[in-house]
Amino acid sequence: MLPDSLSEYDITICLDGIVGDGAVNSTTGDLFIWDRALKNHLLLSERMQTEMFSPQSLIDTITKTYYGYGEFIGENELGKCIKHSGSWPGYRNYLIRYIEEDLTIIVLSNNESDAKRISNELAHNYFGRKPK
């Protein structure tokens, strides 16, 4: 059931077509193919991708998170990473790749679970660290 059909989510009708890429549907498998294609320069030349993943705008001065061209770039206690999230009423998602480890974590939720937190806990588990 699409959130547009639920009266409590009337806001989605107002937002259709004016914010982000709402209503794009995917799977973890397809997002991983996208991630690998970016990593292996199958979509963009290495030069263009370097520019894509270079800091263009400072988003958070405390965490030193930047936005490149279509991706957030930053570093946390687990390492350097590129990441992006998305949401729509009823959905949450988060994709993060830890660059040095080449670890990609993709979380898709169709019940508004905190995909970023779940991703963070999975990453900490992978690195043998206790989540914050």
Image (cartoon, rainbow, N blue to C red):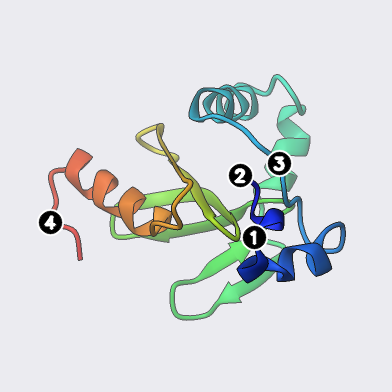
Point out the tag, 3 or 1, that comes first from the N-terminus. 1
Label 3 and label 2: CA atoms lie apart by: 14 Å
Q: Which residue is mark 3?
A: 24
Kind of element beneath mark 3: loop
Q: Is residue 31 above or below residue 9?
A: above
Numbered mark located on residue 6 in the image = 1
Identify which amino acid the numbered label 3 is placed on: Val
Decide if residue 130 is on the left or right side of residue 18: left
Query: How many residues crowd around disc 1 within 10 Å: few (fewer than 14), some, or many (20 or more)?
Result: few
Give me the residue at 71% from left, 37% from top.
49
Where does the image place residue 55, in percent across and percent down from the top left?
66, 60
Q: Classify 109 as above or below 32.
A: below
* Residue at 52% from the left image edge and 48% from the top image edge: 82
Q: Which residue is mark 4?
A: 130
- CB-based contact (under 8 Å), mark 4 and mark 3: no
N-term mark: 3 or 2? 2
Kindly identify the amino acid type of the residue bearing the numbered disc 1: Leu
Q: Is residue 28 left or right of residue 69?
A: left
